[in-house]
Image (spheres, rainbow, N blue to C red):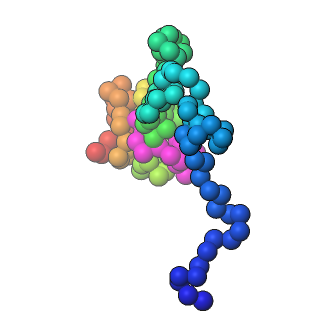
Amino acid sequence: MKLNTLKPSEGSNPSAKRVGRGIGSGFGKTAGRGHKGQKSRAGGSVAVGFEGGQMPIQRRLPKRGFKSSQKDYKDQIRTSELNKLPAGKIDLLTLKKENLVSELALSVKIFLSGEVKNKYTISGLGVTKGAKEAIEAAGGKIES
């Protein structure tokens, strides 16, 4: 086999439609583009969503709502939920193991809701002012 003898298989490469080559071809004169108008001309394409000057539907419909791209990565927990854990050190891994926060959570904030019954040492978690006071009142402490 030689490179100069290679050919595509029979029928796999149809010849291009030769437009504008006389009446007998069936694609003479207007070359299958019809008469006049934007699409008959070279480069005459219409932008996606263009509706002939009418206000496009994507601009007529109301835009509402917002979906945070960070929502899934932040979580929060009540002080009353801390009572489900034994006294001791609490961090992000501890909360994930006990299924108190999502596995996807990258940051967690503790807020005041209910009372704290055990001594906890909180590390690496956000704490609101009220929650901090409640944890410290129960004999716990907050490490940053």
The residue drawn where x is 53% and y is 83% is 3
The residue drawn where x is 36% and y is 25% is 130
Instruction: Pick out the residue farthest to the left.
Output: 144
Horizontal and vertical percent position of residue 28: 59, 37
Would you place residue 98 above or below residue 29 in this image? below
The residue drawn where x is 50% and y is 21% is 37
Q: In the visual, does 20 lie left or right of 121? A: right
The residue drawn where x is 50% and y is 15% is 52
Asked if the stretch drawn in magenta spans residue 97, the answer is yes
Horizontal and vertical percent position of residue 117: 48, 35
Depth check: 107 or 127 in front? 107
Would you place residue 73 above or below residue 111 in this image? below
Would you place residue 105 above or below residue 127 in this image? below
Instruction: Pick out the residue farthest to the bottom.
Output: 1
The answer to whether residue 98 is seen in the rendering is: no
Give the total of numbered labels: 0
Q: In the visual, does 10 lie left or right of 99? A: right
Horizontal and vertical percent position of residue 93: 47, 52
Horizontal and vertical percent position of residue 114: 50, 25
In terms of secondary structure, what is the magenta stretch mainly? loop
Question: Hey, which quadrant is residue 141 in on the image?
Answer: top left
What range is drawn magenta here? 96-109
Q: In the visual, does 13 lie left or right of 111? A: right
Question: Hey, which quadrant is residue 43 in on the image?
Answer: top left
